[in-house]
Amino acid sequence: MKASNRSIRNRLVFAAVFAAMIAVSNFFQIPLPGGVPIVLKNMFVVLSGTILGNCYGGIAALILIAAGLIGIPVFVIPGGIGVFNTPLGGYILGYFIASLCAGLVCGLPKTSEKKISPIPLIRLCIASFLGFALILCCGSLYIMFLKSMTLKAAFLAGTAPFILGDLIKLALSIPLALALRPIAARHINNEG
């Protein structure tokens, strides 16, 4: 098997593994009155993008969404297409957008990233922040349209309760991604 084919296969396997990790993170949640709990899931969604890079985090999110839409219990509520009739639907769409954008900002990991340098670190911080922000924005905008709320009311319901938790998860995700990107690069990047 050619090295590039092996790299692509490994990237897809890693995307599937990240989809499974995102699904398992469902079990760690703090219920909130609005119906959307605080979960670790969005941290793993962002990590899938920042660790795998390019579009492979987005593929992990698509695998997760597809599994949920066919009824596999990977969402915090029962799955199926009906999940998009709930406030959670916007966050689920945000998972794909966030992981894809975070991965595109970070790019494929390289084994040379063992040495922390300013440009990759800044890119990783921007990608992580962008990922968390996109999930919250998608969730709030979806709530706004679903429940015919004002933007301010949707922000208060769909973003404000999660800001502190997401800042903590953001602070945890950056060093995790820094540590794991060079490891992932050994398996998914065909560097000469």
Image: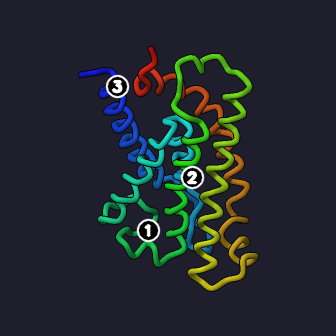
Residue 111 locus on image (x, y percent) = 52, 19
Which SS class for mark 2?
helix
Q: Nearer the viewer, residue 162 or 118?
A: 118
Picture disc at residue 25? none
> Which amino acid is tagged 2?
Ala
Q: Nearer the viewer, residue 124 or 27?
A: 124
Q: Position of residue 112 (x, y in %)?
A: 57, 17
Q: Is residue 123 above or below residue 38?
A: above
Residue at 49% from the left image edge and 36% from the top image edge: 52
Report how far apart the C-alphas of labels 1 and 2 lie in the structure: 21 Å
Q: CA distance from mark 3 to mark 1?
A: 39 Å
Q: Secondary structure at mark 1?
A: loop
Q: Residue, x 50% and y 39% (percent of image)?
A: 54
Residue identifier under label 3:
4
Tell me which amino acid carries mark 3: Ser
Residue wearing tag 1: 77
Q: Residues within 10 Å of mark 2 (few under 14, many from 20)?
A: many
Q: Earlier in the sequence, mark 3 or mark 1?
A: 3
Circle 3 Cα neighbour tier, 10 Å, few/some/many (<14 / 14–19 / ≥20) = few
What coloring was used for the rendering? rainbow
> In the current view of this chain or complex, which residue is farthest to the bottom?
148
Q: Which mark is residue 98?
A: 2
- Left/right placement of residue 164 relative to residue 32 reads right
